[in-house]
Image (spheres, rainbow, N blue to C red):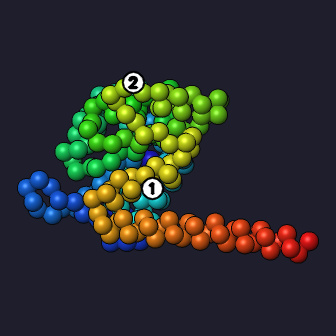
Amino acid sequence: MSSEQVAGRGREKRSMTVPAGSEVTGPLVGIVMGSDSDWPTMSAAAEALDEFGIAYEADVVSAHRMPKEMIEYGESAAERGLKVVIAGAGGAAHLPGMLASVTQLPVIGVPVALKYLDGMDSLLSIAQMPAGVPVATMAVGGARNAGLFAVRILATQDPDLLVAMREFQTQLGAQAKAKGAALRSSLKRK
Ligand code: RP5
């Protein structure tokens, strides 16, 4: 996957206000990953952001293979207008923690499962951060929740987004209740 900027679909794209007071549009969330091989997992974060009309950018920023660019990405993220960074990596997954060390933005880490160890290596590499440098670590492969968590962070400053999240949660509850009803009715038929 090449460097790309993807605007939110489905809802009107959300904009941000830069310090000078002028209204500009740009990505609010940066989705980065150690390799394009992480994208099949990480694309679920992008899909969740799309559902809420959140503009995002997505790129490969490898902590080990392109460390200088990785530091530059983290250092410039806030001034470029990003509000949240979602970082996914597999194996010795140092990308989320290293980004958290050079940005003041919230970093959400997604452990990507590789061929061996079922993603436990990725999970521990991302979760076991030293005090003072937090990373909000999702479940192994939990990129959809990373996207939804980013929406929740943005919703603290956006009443419309808060309403949209409430609607989403209501729908989620309705779907769960429908599953229960379907299960109960299938048991009655026996
Ligand atoms: C990690 O190494 C990446 O995040 C990816 O999960 C893994 C494998 O990368 P490739 O060899 O597929 O490029 O840094």
* Residue 9 percent across, percent down from the top left: 40, 68
Q: Nearer the viewer, mark 2 or mark 1?
A: 2
In the picture, measured across the screen, residue 119 lies left or right of residue 25, that is right
Quarter-wise, where is residue 187 in the image? bottom right
For the residues labelled 2 and 1, say whether their Cβ atoms are less than 8 Å apart: no
Q: The residue tagged with tag 2: helix, strand or loop? A: loop
Q: Is residue 56 left or right of residue 51?
A: left
Residue extending furthest toward the left:
20
68 in relation to 155, above or below? above
Residue 45 placement, left or right of 83: right
The residue shown at (54%, 39%) is 112
> Which image quadrant is residue 159 in?
bottom left
Q: From the Cβ of disc 2, is ligand 1 less than 8 Å away?
A: no
Residue in view at x 51 percent, y 69 percent: 170
For label 2, the residue is 130
Residue 89 image point, x, y percent: 48, 36
- Which residue is at the front of the view, 91 or 179? 179
Give, as a three-letter code, the residue at label 2: Pro
Q: In front here: 23 or 182?
A: 182
Q: Which residue is mark 1?
A: 148
* SS for callout 1: helix
The answer, for residue 177, to whether it is visible in the render is yes
Q: Is residue 130 above or below residue 42?
A: above
Please state which amino acid type lies under the numbered disc 1: Leu
In front of the other: 147 or 35? 147
Task: Residue 65: give x, y in percent of width and height.
Answer: 40, 27
Looking at the image, tell me whether mark 2 or mark 1 is earlier in sequence order: 2
- The answer to whether residue 91 of the structure is visible from this angle is no
The quadrant of the rendering that contains the C terminus is: bottom right
**Measured Cα–Cα span from mark 2 to mark 1:** 25 Å
